[in-house]
Amino acid sequence: MKHLPLFFDVAGRKVVVVGMSAAADRRAATVRSAGALVVQVADAGTADFSGAVAAFIATGTEEGDRAAHRLTKAAGVPVNVADRPALCDFILPAIVDRDDVVVAVSTGGASPTLATVLRGRIEQALPERIGALAALAKTFRKQANALISQPAERRAFWRRLVEGPAGKLALAGDSAGARRVVLSELDGARRAATDVGIAHIVGAGPGDPDLLTLRAAQLLQEADAILHDDLVPPAILARARRDAELVSVGKRKGRASWAQRDIEAELVRRVRAGETVVRLKAGDPFVFGRGGEEVDALRAAGLPVSVVPGITAALGIAASTNIPLTDRRVASAVTFMSGHAAADATGGHTHVVYMGASEAASVRDRLLDAGVSPRTPVAIVENGTRPDERVVTGSLADLARLAVSLDSHGDAGPSLIIVGDVAARAVSTELPQLAQPRFAQVS
Ligand SMILES: C[S@@+](CC[C@H](N)C(=O)[O-])C[C@H]1O[C@@H](n2cnc3c(N)ncnc32)[C@H](O)[C@@H]1O
């Protein structure tokens, strides 16, 4: 190991950046993001380094770099000189920054390109919300350490928080659910009943393993058991952890299969027994996938469950066959419908309206004209799947008012309107940093 990796707390401390080059600006921005008081100067004098805890030099000329370097040495301040490893007291690693979780990669200055490539691989492998997991641990640190005095029990608690259902819910974006699990684990009286696993209802996409989502690929590596449809091809199952138990529960025309209620009972049984179970379904679990029924069964049993979307067959095939499902010149709507339900008069119709929130009144009128009941549930979802996702629900008659309530400051993000009986199920997870509840029922 050429350099000793350390994480240096520079918050509120003076760091000098010498130079006005792009490299100097990048260093100033990085150091500032760690809370340092950055003083950036074109030419440094000895006085500039007084009280500084570190200095970065990137003047753009060798002469300038060497002159500034001499001053830092005279001032006794540790220094990094861009692209001049021989003049560096410390190097700046390639960084993966996910809030409190930071991964630093160094090749000892041998190859910044290799460090960048490695950083890219780590970025891909790390769940996007790993920072939320750290935030969850931070929230409960004092409370847990005060409550659990035995070191072994305490270690087991933290391990369970990171690797168990709470951690998985946090990674899935359900911070409120994660906090609920931790709270119930902290509740000694309920501890015995909460030593459960978790189910992930995961979309496998249309069949090409490269069309799995990153989260689906991560969960396949974590699962104790994978209950999969017959339609999921071996190339996708091959991405599972080697010792995961693979159970085919799917059906194909003419072949005996598990009944839906047996699949649900099996999910509940395994999660109760503490397993991490992936229910792997072709395409997307919520498009002709019965994913909603499985979520309901797990929730009814009081068990943790997350849903991971997949690329539905229609979208996969649209791309692979060069059929744009909408094309503003010839098609402004697309309908996904089930062959089974075509003759089934009870099957409701879900409308998903893109680009509609700013014209909510005319969307409402068109749907009413088409015969949709004014009492039909609607949900407007802004910034979907992002940390600042917001959901408002109500009925079609109120659509215009709902859209205004969502955009009360005139700065709303992208949104979709979902109209149909299923919209009544809409829920959103609550994130700790938001003061206001993110889920609002407007009646
Ligand atoms: C029970 S539905 C499941 C749909 C799935 N949840 C989705 O989002 O694509 C099964 C049907 O999806 C369609 N399907 C799924 N994968 C497909 C693929 N790779 N190519 C063509 N059709 C596919 C077929 O019509 C198949 O009978």
Image (tube, rainbow, N blue to C red):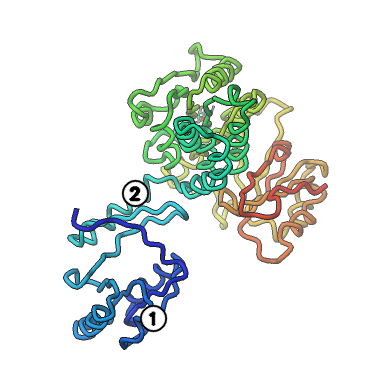
| Inter-mark Cα distance, 1 to 2 | 31 Å
Question: Relative to 254, is 65 on the left or the right?
Answer: left
426 vs 289, left or right, is: right
- Residue 204 visible, this angle: no
In percent of width and height, residue 175 lies at: 58, 43
Q: Which residue corresponds to mark 1?
A: 40
Three-letter amino acid code at disc 1? Gln
Point out the tag, 1 or 2, that comes first from the N-terminus. 1
Instruction: Name the image quarter holding residue 182.
Output: top right
Look at 36% across and 26% down and name the residue there: 234
| Residue 216 vertical placement versus 121 (above, below) | above
- Residue 307 in percent (x, y) is at 55, 36
Q: Disc count in the image?
A: 2
- Asked whether mark 2 lies closer than 8 Å to ligand 1, one says no
Q: Is 333 drawn above or below residue 217 in the view shown?
A: below
Pointer 2 residue: 122
Marks 2 and 1: in contact by CB < 8 Å? no
